[in-house]
Each structure stands twice: as structure tokens, then as C-alpha cells.
Image: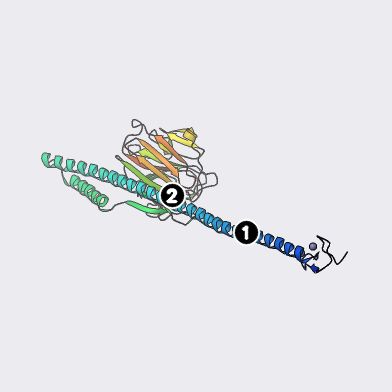
Amino acid sequence: MANECAICHKTIGILKCQGCEVMFCINDYNLHRGELHQQFNALMDEFNQFQDASVNETVNAEQLLFDRTNTWEMQSIQKIKETAEETRHLVATLIKSRNEENSLRTRELIEKLQKGQQTENFDERNLTKWKQELNELKLLVSKLDIYVDEQKSTDPFIMKIFASEKDVFEQTCGDVCIQDNGLLACHTFNLFGNSGEIRGKKQYRVGVHRIRFKIDNLDIHPWWFFGIISKSASMQTNSECLSSAYGWAGHDDVYVNGKPFKKMNGYTSDYSTGDIIELTIDCEHHQIQMTNIRSKKSNEININLSHCPLPWMLHLNLFHIQTRIRINPFNQ
Ligand SMILES: [Zn+2]
Ligand SMILES: [Zn+2]
């Protein structure tokens, strides 16, 4: 029947709910409305719960992101502090070593002068030589050849700091040459690809020293040697074979006492143009160490003083035409 209450089937006072299109008597209509109110209240409760929860969730998510940012901040500051502390320590070590080297030379000159004074055994030739030594000493003492710079990187946000010491290339033997005021070691063009020795100017006798190189250019199949040699060794074209030659070369060779050892302590000759190489010369512990800043690979060699007596000098040997090695690379 169309005109009766769907619940109690009364036919008097019938109302139609517009929402569900069901017919009700007054009494059942009111009950029906009551149900709708209950459903509405339940919906409101759910909505309020959702609102409270979503506010809490946002607060929690925000806190999580803040926490993550704060952790990054703390760790980065810590890393910067540690690196700064290491650099300060290294600067102090380099300056101490430099002062020790200089006072050693000063003492030697004083002894020579005192001996000359006591024995009166000198003439113009001695005076000229001592004057020259004094001038060299003045130059060494007057300029502080240690520097601190930022390590250039592909990620420019805060660059790492480092400290280093300056040296220059001074002597050559064979098909090699020095350019750019002693800062660039080059191979001289030669069809047969002969090798040649290049040495630094400084003598290392005490303390710890650190020098940087940059590979300005390398051949496709590069072979080059870098390391140290005793000052007492005479210059020669295949200088890496001299008994006081210690260092690193191409073909994964580590040279100890003038002899090559393949992949010693995991060494591989992984070099590319643009690489920065850090060389640490530790006269105290009779050790040299190299680090490639790009690959972060390091290698250490112990030096036998009976094969390689102090003082030591920087020592390069270049074989290929296009090899160019820069010393004290600035702002790299
Ligand atoms: Zn209804
Ligand atoms: Zn009814």
C-alpha cells in the first residue's frame, strides 16, 4: 500500500521522508528522525576525532622534520669543529717542523762561523759562501711558506679546509723541464719517450711536512713517479731506480729502496687529470704518505734510513710527453 506507515502500517496522518522516500506515521516519523540525528552525531564525532588527530599528526611530522634538521645541524657543526681542530693541529705541527728545520740550519751556520773565527782559517771564498748561506737563511726565516685554504669540491656548500706547506721544483735531469717559476714540472717533447728526474728545492730533515700536487695533465697510459730521494743521491734520468728512491708510480708500482712492488698495501695508480695529491713527509717516524683527495685513497711507505739518509727531497720522475705536475696548487 502506498499510503500507509512502512513500520506499523497505520494509514492515518502519513508523512513521507524526502530523503529515503519512505512513508511514516507521526510516531514512527519522529523515531526515524531520531535515528538520523544519531547518525549525524556519529558523523560529527568522527569528524572531530579526525580533526584532532590530523592536528596531532601534523605536529608530530613537523617535530620529526625539525629533529632531523637539528641532528644534521649538530653533526655538521661537530664535523666542522673536528676538521678545524685537526687543521689547527696540523698548522702547529708544520710550523714547529719548519722552525726546527730553520734552527738546524742556523746552528750549522753559527758553528761554521765560530770555527772560522777561532781558527782564522778563512778567506774571500769562505766569506762569499757564508754570506750566500746567510741570505738563504734570511729568506727561509722571513717568509712563512705554510698556507691554509679551502678544498675546492663539486659540492660548493661549505668547503673543507686544509693546511699545507710550499716547496718548488728546482733541479732537473733528462727530458724534463720546470716552468712557471718552479711550480710546474713538465716532460719535454721527445719521440722516444725518455724519462727524467725533477727534484724539489727544500731539504727535509726534522718534523712533519705536507705538500700538495695537482695533476695538470696526464697521458692516456700515464707513468710518473713521485716521492722522495736522499739529497746525497746524484741526479739521473731513471732516478726511481736509485736506492734512496721511495714513492709511488704508474702500473700500480710502489717504489721502496729503488725497487718496484706491485700493489703494495693495496696501492693502485688511479690518477686523472685534475687530481690533487697530498704528500706527507714524516721525518720523525721515517715515513711518507700519499692521499688522492678525489679518490680518498691513501698509501704509506716506511723509509729505511740506511738506504735513504736524511735530508730528503721531493722527487718526481716523468716518462710521458704530456705529463705536467703542479706543486702548491692555489685555490684548488
Ligand atoms: Zn527517511
Ligand atoms: Zn507508524
Residue 271, x across and y down, in percent: 50, 45
Residue 227, x across and y down, in percent: 41, 40
Q: Compared with residue 35, is residue 274 higher up or lower down, i.e. above or below?
A: above
| Left or right of 125 on screen, residue 325 | right
Q: Compared with residue 249, is residue 332 higher up or lower down, i.e. above or below?
A: below
Give the residue type at disc 1. Asp
Evaluate whether residue 168 shows in this view.
Answer: no
What's the image's color scheme?
Answer: rainbow
Q: Compared with residue 43, is residue 266 higher up or lower down, i.e. above or below?
A: above
Q: Nearer the viewer, residue 254 or 173?
A: 254
Q: Say which residue appears at 23% left-offset and 47% top-offset.
A: 133
Q: Identify the disc placed on residue 135.
A: none
Give the residue type at disc 2. Gln
The furthest residue to the top? 306
Q: Residues within 10 Å of mark 1 (few under 14, many from 20)?
A: few
Residue 40, x across and y down, in percent: 67, 62
Q: Earlier in the sequence, mark 2 or mark 1?
A: 1
**CA distance for labels 2 and 1:** 45 Å
SS for dot 2? helix
Q: Residues within 10 Å of mark 2 (few under 14, many from 20)?
A: few
Residue 171, x across and y down, in percent: 36, 46
- Which corner quadrant of the figure contains ligand 2? bottom right
- Residue 199 sits in quarter: top left
Which residue does the numbered mark 2 point to in the structure image? 75
SS for dot 1? helix
Which residue does the numbered mark 1 point to in the structure image? 45
